[in-house]
Image: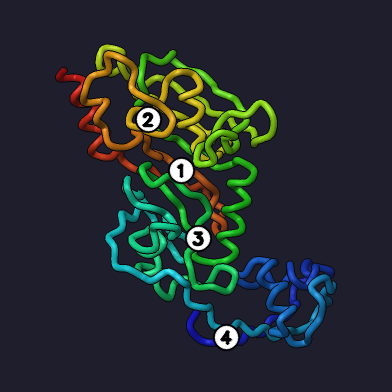
Amino acid sequence: MNETQKLHIQVINPSEVGLRLDKFLSLKTDLSRTRIASLIKEGYLNPNLPADFKVVLGQSFDLILPPAQDAVPNAQEIPLDILYEDNDLIVLNKPAGMVVHPGAGNFSGTLVNALLAHCGDSLSGIGGVKRPGIVHRIDKETSGVLVVAKNDVTHQKLSEQFSVHSIHRIYQAIVYGFTPPSGTVRGNIGRSSTNRQKMAILTQGGKPAVTHFKLIKPLFNGKASLIECRLETGRTHQIRVHMTSIKHPLVGDKTYGNAPKGTPEILRLFPRQALHAAELGFIHPRTEKNILIKAPMPTDMQLLIQASDIL
């Protein structure tokens, strides 16, 4: 949204009578109640009534939408592997090595930089800023499916689904050792008390985390395993921490696990954690249809599995 817009909104449905003003306006626009409340507070609504005002039949409102502010990160033309896109959201297959959001040491070349260039004016603004709504993240060295919101309401509703853990998430991982056929790992995850750059399973504090896994295929004569992980929760580094806790760290994970003695060199030299976000399922915030997106396993992990069949 590059120009100021004026929306004329009227209460014409009896079912809307008695709704809070911020909720009513949110239902009539692509803006979250938080954004609506902010616009009311800043004087962009006529008549200027409080957010908790109860609307009445026939009442009219003029809502001014100021232009979305340009995002601080620069837009960069970076190729994207787009799996699904509409006016509300975009789902991508993030390559390993790409940072999701600009930060210390990564001010360019990130997914956000690429999205700003690709989406352009289709971004109506998250919180009044023309930027993609990052609902969740996956690590720099992890590949796979990631959903991003284009507007306030989509961002809010997707965030709610992640918050209540109703999102379907399947990961593929290659771990050291021969895992059991299936299992569940539980343990609260929080910042490590000895290394703030790492997460850890905590006996006190942290957030509950549950990972279900199953063996897909043993690799390298049992020196490694291809597994599938289903997340019941979505904590930072959850799979990496949980699999390390049961003595099956991810191949290539320099932070949480070292290669056991006797590990084939091809495993020890794998340059990243062998983790891929393979499936993401959610309810579309606007259509309320179930969306399931799958991303093919990246070439480097495929080659590692093929090498197991040869060696």
Taking the spot 65% from the left edge, 66% from the top edge, the residue there is 32
Residue plotted at (51% across, 50% down): 136
Residue at point 19% right, 19% down? 309
Q: How is the image coloured?
A: rainbow
Mark toward the start of the polypeptide (4 vs 3): 4
Amino acid residing under circle 3: Ala
Look at mark 1 in the image and give the residue it sits on: 280
Q: Give yes or no for contact between labels 1 and 3 (Cβ–Cβ under 8 Å).
A: no
As helix, strand or loop, the secondary structure at mark 1 comes to strand
Residue under numbered circle 2: 173
Residue 217: percent from left, percent from top: 32, 19
Q: What amino acid is found at the position of numbered circle 4 in the picture?
A: Gln
Q: Quadrant of residue 114?
A: bottom left
- Left or right of 234 in this view: 140: left
**Secondary structure type for disc 3:** strand
Give the crowd class for mark 3: few <14, some 14-19, many >=20 residues within 10 Å. Answer: many
> Are the residues at dot 2 and dot 4 in contact (C-beta closer than 8 Å)?
no
Residue at which label 3 appears:
149
Marks 2 and 3, the one that precedes in the sequence: 3
N-terminal label among 4 and 1: 4
Disc with the residue nearer the chain's start (2 vs 1): 2
Going by the numbered disc 2, the residue's amino acid type is Ala
**Residue denoted by label 4:** 5
Of callouts 2 and 4, the N-terminal one: 4
Q: Nearer the viewer, mark 2 or mark 1?
A: 2
What amino acid type is highlighted by mark number 1?
Leu
